Image (cartoon, rainbow, N blue to C red):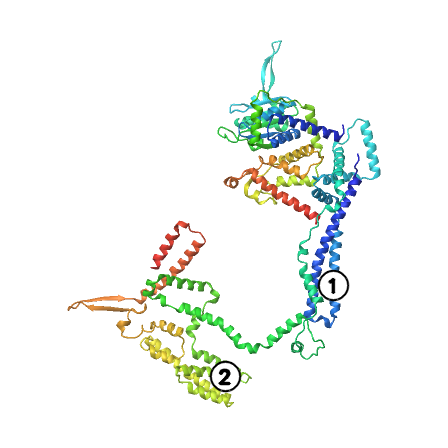
């Protein structure tokens, strides 16, 4: 199969997958795109939104539309790390001998839904760390690889903060995207009511299997990116660092810590998926810009000045992007003049 | 694979050519602007410095025109020949045609392949064939780059049919202002010179016979300036008045400080607003430190010193052509002064003027010296009477003796010696004059019944009033600082009235 046919297969599979998700999920087009982008890029997603907006339903539908194993963990304050990664238990064999046998936890699945991840203690949350980054967990001194593809979708509720444990920066950084699930529009809400309160519920077909997902993930990494586009992503990430010499004024005023290099990786990988799904073989500046917000919003830590002015990370990143965009445009104009 | 790097190269060449054309246009505009500036400067220089004596007018005009054209051409050539890299051309085309960086990516990933030599390419082809035969997969990045190249060329080819769409024609900043230097250039080189009167021409070039009956506009302006300079002596009185204005202003400012009408206790108590207004005016004057009046010189100056100084100047410049005129002027002033005040030196002045009319300048100077001597004696006498008698009881006599002393000087000088205030304050019986000025001190009393007891009252002790003056001065400074602080919003708004009331109570 040559490149063109592989890209065509990728595009058609993506469209089919998206179609299946849209059978169940009404609206939230950008959330669906973000989740699929992250999955095809091999990253993880943190979904943030109020209860009842369809976060869990989205992930469950995604699992149903793929020939992949799916596990769900409802995070609670008394959840232990071994409840996630598994543990060694004593078993007795036929001959009466006893030995330890590893009982795998729910993390050993292709798609893992970590529901209300901020309700567990940091100790339990950190049990996900190794699995998300290394695609392997270590139990009893043995490193055990996780099945491929491995895709974590975590949800959290931004309203009920009492009795929760905000995710530490190290764990936040391991999520490729943070997507904010907003309230549906009036028409969308009507459609949700129609779909969910009737006897005939939409059924989802499986459109991709494990091999197809892995092939898509490898194809994504082959997409070329021009140096000026890569530089653009780098400049965006560096512009979030207040100590950088060319950092914009908004960064110096409101940002405490900038984004990590993982942010740049996330942006570029997400942009590659976006380019392929748009029918292009290369990454453009627009792809990078589209991926900047979900890649940066959970990695940029704001200072007290921003909080006192009721600025959230989205507003600050918007201003940073505007500054970098202006510089980019000026560079092309100088080349033309 | 339909597309190949040479196709991309051809496409980019067309784009680069169009970019260079646009650059050449901009360069031409810029060159024309600066060329016009230089050409106009050349023509202006020629007009002002009479370059035509060395070079003919047509020659300078031709030189300016050549500069204009050369700069235009130079700008176009320099910018037009600047190299446009393939990547820059690709980025410009991507941006213009909305190709989402297809061409730029293709340039980076595909053109290096085209740079290989034929031998290398054949070697690589053989290697790939061997690799495929051995079951090795081709480099996925490279195959993706080839697909990307084909996509880029397929997307750009229809748009590249009209490369003029790549860069919109935009005028540089200099083009908006080019009419200004061009207008000057045309005016200086092509407009006919303006006619001027022959007298003006002769004045402009004395001793040189000019054949031309006309001069250019610049010449005319220059001649006009020279003519004005020549007429300066006729307007000397006006200039002198203009020069005297600062002196008059300084005197007014001095009067502002000398005016103590509001410092009288009865007045200040009645009208505080007037007092504050006067104080503000003085403070404003104090802020203008460079224009403060010279109070000391006002005290020290006198008519005698003024006239003596002028006499010294005359003696120092004796023998010059202007001496008799200036001496006559001084004598006339002294005569006027003497006539006004019925002074003793009028006779000497009249005699000196008579001598001057007879042509005896030496005799006139001697008469002047004698008049000055009398004037000095009169002023000494007046000063002595002030010092010894306070100028109170003999105020009227002094006034008649001091002659032309100005009102300000008179009032200020009398204050310095516990003197009268106003026209009626210094006259009459001492009891009536009591408390007429804040400087008077007295003890008034009245017998109580037929006994020996007396009701006494001390009024207006000078010492205490002096302390009060100092106090008021200090308070005024602090009050000004307070107003500044309030104006700079260093004080919360709720406290403004409270603070102002506090300072007002201090003033009262």
Crowd class of label 1 (few under 14; some 14 to 19; many from 20; radius 10 Å): many
Residue located farthest toward the top when viewing the structure as drawn: A95
Q: Chain of mark 1?
A: B
Residue A143 at least partly seen: no
**What quarter of the picture does the N terminus of chain A occupy?**
top right
Where residue A294 appears, x then y in whole percent? 60, 34
The number of discs equals 2
Where residue A8 appears, x then y in whole percent? 72, 30
Q: Report the Cα–Cα distance between label 1 and label 2.
A: 62 Å
Figure check: B156 above or below B30: above
Where residue B6 appears, x then y in whole percent? 80, 40
Figure check: B441 above or below A333: below
Figure check: B54 above or below B113: below
Quarter of the figure with residue A296: top right
Q: Chain of mark 2?
A: B
Crowd class of label 2 (few under 14; some 14 to 19; many from 20; radius 10 Å): many
Q: Is residue A56 rendered to the left or right of residue A225?
A: left
The secondary structure type at the circle numbered 1 is: helix
The secondary structure type at the circle numbered 2 is: helix
Label 1 vs label 2, nearer the camera = 1
Depth check: give the residue in front, B200 or B467. Answer: B200
In the drawing, what numbered circle is on residue B65?
Answer: 1
Q: Are marks 1 and 2 on the same chain?
A: yes
Q: Which residue is mark 2?
A: B327
């Amino acid at each position: 199969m040559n490149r063109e046919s592989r890209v065509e297969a990728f595009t058609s599979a993506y469209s089919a997958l998206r179609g299946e998700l849209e059978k169940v999920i009404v609206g939230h087009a950008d959330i669906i795109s973000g989740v699929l982008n992250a999955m095809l890029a091999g990253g993880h997603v943190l979904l943030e939104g109020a209860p009842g907006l369809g976060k869990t339903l989205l992930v469950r539908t995604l699992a149903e539309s793929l020939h992949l194993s799916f596990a769900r963990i409802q995070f609670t304050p008394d959840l232990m790390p071994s409840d996630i990664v598994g543990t060694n238990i004593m078993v007795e064999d036929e001959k009466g001998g006893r030995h330890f046998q590893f009982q795998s936890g729910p993390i050993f699945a292709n798609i893992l839904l970590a529901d209300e991840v901020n309700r567990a203690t940091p100790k339990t949350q950190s049990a996900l760390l190794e699995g998300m980054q290394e695609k392997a967990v270590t139990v009893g001194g043995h490193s055990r690889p996780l099945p491929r593809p491995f895709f974590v979708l975590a949800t959290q509720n931004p309203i009920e903060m009492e009795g929760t444990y905000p995710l530490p920066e190290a764990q936040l950084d391991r999520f490729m995207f943070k997507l904010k699930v907003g309230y549906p529009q009036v028409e969308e809400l009507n459609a949700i009511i129609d779909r969910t309160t009737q006897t005939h519920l939409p059924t989802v077909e499986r459109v991709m299997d494990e091999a197809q997902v892995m092939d898509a993930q490898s194809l994504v990494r082959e997409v070329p990116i021009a140096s000026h586009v890569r530089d653009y992503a780098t400049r965006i990430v560096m512009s979030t660092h207040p100590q950088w010499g060319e950092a914009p004024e908004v960064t110096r005023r409101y940002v405490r810590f900038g984004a990590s290099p993982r942010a740049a990786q996330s942006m570029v990988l997400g942009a590659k998926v976006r380019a392929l799904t748009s029918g292009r073989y290369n990454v453009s500046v627009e792809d990078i810009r589209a991926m900047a917000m979900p890649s940066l919003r959970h990695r940029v830590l704001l200072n007290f000045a921003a909080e006192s002015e009721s600025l959230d990370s989205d507003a600050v990143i918007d201003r940073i992007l505007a500054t970098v965009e202006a510089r980019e445009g000026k560079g092309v104009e100088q080349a033309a003049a | 694979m339909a597309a190949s790097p040479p196709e991309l190269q051809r496409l980019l060449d067309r784009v680069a050519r169009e970019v260079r054309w646009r650059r050449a246009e901009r360069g031409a505009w810029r060159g024309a602007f600066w060329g016009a500036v230089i050409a106009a400067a050349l023509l202006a220089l020629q007009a002002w410095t009479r370059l035509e004596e060395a070079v003919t007018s047509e020659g300078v005009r031709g030189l300016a025109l050549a500069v204009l054209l050369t700069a235009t051409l130079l700008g176009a050539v320099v910018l037009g020949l600047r190299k446009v890299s393939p990547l820059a051309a690709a980025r410009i085309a991507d941006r213009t045609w909305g190709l989402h960086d297809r061409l730029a990516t293709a340039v980076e990933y595909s053109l290096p392949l085209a740079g290989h030599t034929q031998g290398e390419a054949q070697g690589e082809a053989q290697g790939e064939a061997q690799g495929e035969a051995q079951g090795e997969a081709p480099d996925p990045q490279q195959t993706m780059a080839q697909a990307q190249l084909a996509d880029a060329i397929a997307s750009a080819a229809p748009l590249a049919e009209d490369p003029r769409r790549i860069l919109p024609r935009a005028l540089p900043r200099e083009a908006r202002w080019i009419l200004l230097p061009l207008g000057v250039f045309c005016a200086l080189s092509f407009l006919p010179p303006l006619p001027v009167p022959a007298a003006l021409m002769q004045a402009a070039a004395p001793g040189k016979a000019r054949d031309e009956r006309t001069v250019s506009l610049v010449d005319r302006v220059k001649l006009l300036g020279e003519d004005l300079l020549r007429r300066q002596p006729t307007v000397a009185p006006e200039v002198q008045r203009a020069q005297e204005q600062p002196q008059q202003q300084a005197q007014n400012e001095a009067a502002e400080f000398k005016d103590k009408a509001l410092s009288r206790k009865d007045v200040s108590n009645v009208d505080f607003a007037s007092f504050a207004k006067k104080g503000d005016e003085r403070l404003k004057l104090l802020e203008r430190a460079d224009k403060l009046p010279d109070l000391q010189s006002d005290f020290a100056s006198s008519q005698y010193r003024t006239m003596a100084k002028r006499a010294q100047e005359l003696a120092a410049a004796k023998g010059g052509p202007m001496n008799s005129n200036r001496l006559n002027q001084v004598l006339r002033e002294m005569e006027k002064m003497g006539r006004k005040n019925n002074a003793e030196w009028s006779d000497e002045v009249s005699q000196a003027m008579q001598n001057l009319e007879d042509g005896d300048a030496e005799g006139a100077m001697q008469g002047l010296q004698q008049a000055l001597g009398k004037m000095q004696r009169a002023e000494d006498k007046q000063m002595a009477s002030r010092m010894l008698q306070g100028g109170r009881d003999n105020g009227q006599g002094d006034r008649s003796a001091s002659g032309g002393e100005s009102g300000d000087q008179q009032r200020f000088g009398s204050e310095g010696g516990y003197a009268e205030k106003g026209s009626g304050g210094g006259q009459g019986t001492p009891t009536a004059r009591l408390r007429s000025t804040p400087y008077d001190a007295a003890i008034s009393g009245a017998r109580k019944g037929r006994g020996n007891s007396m009701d006494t009252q001390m009024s207006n002790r000078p010492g205490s009033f002096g302390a009060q003056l100092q106090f008021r001065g200090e308070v005024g400074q602090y009050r000004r600082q307070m107003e500044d602080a309030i104006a700079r919003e260093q004080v919360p708004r709720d406290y403004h009235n409270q603070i102002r009331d506090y300072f007002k109570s201090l003033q009262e």
